[in-house]
Amino acid sequence: MRMVLLGAPGAGKGTQASVIADQNGVAHVASGDLFRKHLGEGTDLGKLAKTFMDKGDLVPDDVTVKMVLERIAEPDAAGGYVLDGFPRTGAQAEALDAALVSAGQVLDIAPLIEVDTEELVRRLAGRWICRVCQIPYHEITAPPKQTGVCDKDGGELYQRDDDKAEVVRARLQTYQALTAPLIDYYEGQSKLVRVNGQQDVEKVTADLLAAVSASAVS
Ligand code: ADP
Ligand code: ADP
């Protein structure tokens, strides 16, 4: 299975991608997680990415495309992947399509998780991330069993710098201007499926999995 998971910041892409990837035995590839890993390791790419991430801007296409295409060429992604946060521009989507063609592969589906802006802001304001595995929690809707500690690996939970209200506003504008046009792009390829993201996490997962099954049949 090869999936591009679309949705605004806070829509639930990371939450859903990790469950769907686990259930289907494919890789969860999140461009934001890859940038944060570089940041944590203090690499040049991490330092470059930070200057854009801090402002709610996108990291330039050339470095982003190279990083993600290298990641999906790794052995654990050979059997498929769920892409979370990539592509975010038309140029990234075209680069992914070109890579798929040269590998003789096809993208199966591009679900869009739909959530209204007010709810996105609420979700990002209460989001906590595991320092080890980057799984997201929410202080009200998806709290960990023990405050500040990841259920899966005991990692410390922290709030992202770019989840501050002023950066969130910029990220939502960036999404509307540069990423929302991908909805038409994937609709044009008959890959787009709209899923209501304002339901319980489990119900959103069930709707996504139903969309995957339906696309496999058609
Ligand atoms: P979100 O939770 O908003 O979906 P991500 O963790 O996916 O956030 O991304 C955080 C930041 O990393 C983005 O605001 C952007 O600066 C950078 N980033 C992530 N993915 C991409 C991408 N595909 N292209 C450019 N920049 C990206
Ligand atoms: P994205 O990767 O699209 O930015 P996340 O998966 O990180 O989104 O989710 C954003 C925040 O919303 C997190 O705090 C997460 O726990 C919470 N969240 C995710 N899905 C739901 C849902 N269906 N209902 C309520 N809260 C959710």
Image (spheres, helix red, strand yellow):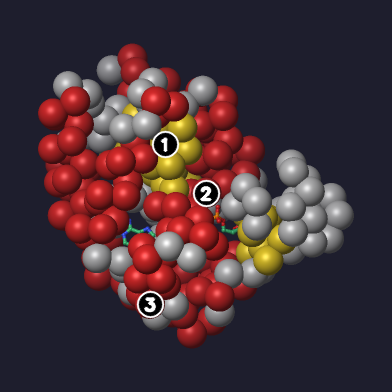
* Rendering quadrant holding ligand 2: bottom right
Amino acid carrying label 1: it is Val
* Position of residue 136 measured from the top left corner of the image (x, y, whole percent): 62, 54
Q: Is mark 1 within 8 Å of ligand 2?
A: no
Q: Is mark 2 within 8 Å of ligand 2?
A: yes
Identify residue for label 3. 51
Identify residue for label 2. 14
First reached walking from the N terminus: tag 3 or tag 1 = 3
Q: Secondary structure at mark 2?
A: helix
* Position of residue 11 measured from the top left corner of the image (x, y, whole percent): 49, 56
Residue sitting at 46 percent across and 69 percent down?
117
User: Quick check: can you spot residue 75?
Assistant: yes
On residue 170, the disc is: none
Residue sitting at 30 percent across and 41 percent down?
70
Mark 1–mark 2 Cα distance, whole angstroms, equals 10 Å
Amino acid carrying label 2: it is Gly
Between 3 and 100, the residue placed more toward the observer is 100
Mark 3–mark 1 Cα distance, whole angstroms, equals 27 Å
Residue 58 lies left or right of residue 156; in this view the side is left
User: Quick check: can you spot residue 183?
Assistant: no
Q: Nearer the viewer, mark 3 or mark 2?
A: 3
Residue 187 lies left or right of residue 115; in this view the side is left
User: Looking at the image, do the residues carrying marks 3 and 2 touch, with CB atoms under 8 Å apart?
Assistant: no
Q: Secondary structure at mark 1?
A: strand
* Position of residue 87 measured from the top left corner of the image (x, y, whole percent): 29, 50
Q: Secondary structure at mark 3?
A: helix
Between 41 and 97, the residue placed more toward the observer is 41
Identify residue for label 1. 82
First reached walking from the N terminus: tag 1 or tag 2 = 2
Residue sitting at 51 percent across and 31 percent down?
21
Query: For the N terminus, which image quadrant?
Result: top left
